[in-house]
Amino acid sequence: MSGDVLVSARGLEVHFPVGGRGFRRKPAGLLRAVDGVDLDIHRGETLGLVGESGCGKSTLGNALLRLVPTTGGTLTFDGTDLTGLEGRRLKELRRRAGMVFQDPFASLDPRRTVAQTVGEPLEVHGLRTGKRARADRVAELLELVGLDPGVAGRYPHEFSGGQRQRVGIARALAGEPDFLVCDEAIASLDVSVQAQVLNLLRRLQRQLGLTLLFISHDLSAVRHISDRIAVMYLGRIVEVGPARAVGTDPQMPYTQALLSAVPLPHPKLERERKRIVLTGDVPSPAAVPSGCRFRTRCPYAFEPCDDVDPALQSVGAPGQQAACHLHGVVGAPAAAPEGVTATP
């Protein structure tokens, strides 16, 4: 593993049992929310993670912080294997990672003041001793995110949505993290406020040397803030590469369809461009198709797509990878049904 990789996942899986009722009833199946993800996040970069609702983006972000249990694969943070880490060692590493949630109102305790909310990580991790030292640090954090330290005694309902999200960012920074997961951090904000929060995150990333995972379904915002973009579909990364390359020359049909849905600023450009409209419904993560999981909606699907699960392969610009047989059939044959022996 390269020395500049801060977070690394190999074959990461998060499966949830579904169906089955009653005492000790076996589950009827598995919901494959994250299903074999290979991903590297480099120190100091912003990686954008995009995809449709329900594709597993948020579950992957939670798994990288060990907020949900993983069912397979390996996960490392700064060279330390997190897969089996528990207790004090896991708590120490969690201090180095923070999270900014989607809903800035639901993620803040309405009965706690801003000072109590932002100061709690300081107390939990023992970063400041004494009320005075914690109060001074809370004031510094509020100033850092663009809030007046005088609001420390107020409650969440006294703020606008954008201000509440700034409080959430201050809380995430209280542990002095190296890694920050922003899970749809601008989705519930007005457009003008979205731009302010994006610019704030970019400034903090440069100022503090943070590594960001920016999860969103808004490709325009992701292209604005990210160094690299990873595209997720049905629990799997299907394309990853430099933001400019993925944003202007996508190599995977699913990414092409996502980009064609991004509104353009000029009506003439909007009329002239060709939209890619996907047919069919998104398959359930509890019943993932064999072979390429996008084949049921792909306009270019051909014979190998039914039987071979495509692996990420280098295509397009340097550092760009896509899991698509249009660039060559590379991957593993579909698993044989239970009780059937696969023939070579």
Image (cartoon, rainbow, N blue to C red):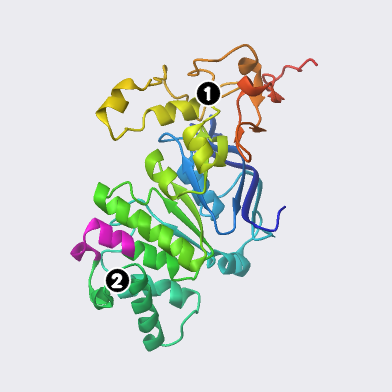
CA separation in Å, label 2 and label 1: 45 Å
Q: Position of residue 223 (x, y in %)?
A: 43, 43
Residue 9 in view: yes
Q: Mark 1 points at which residue?
A: 294
The range drawn in magenta is 156-166
For image coordinates 41% across by 62% down, the residue present is 203
Specify the amino acid type for callout 1.
Phe
Residue 20 in view: no
Q: Position of residue 281 (x, y in %)?
A: 42, 21
Numbered circle sitting on residue 233 = none
Q: Mark 2 points at which residue?
A: 114
- Which quarter shows the C terminus? top right
For image coordinates 53% across by 35% down, the residue present is 235
Question: Which residue lies most toward the top here?
Answer: 303
Q: How crowded is mark 2: few (under 14 residues within 10 Å), some or many (20 or more)?
A: many
Specify the amino acid type for callout 2.
Val
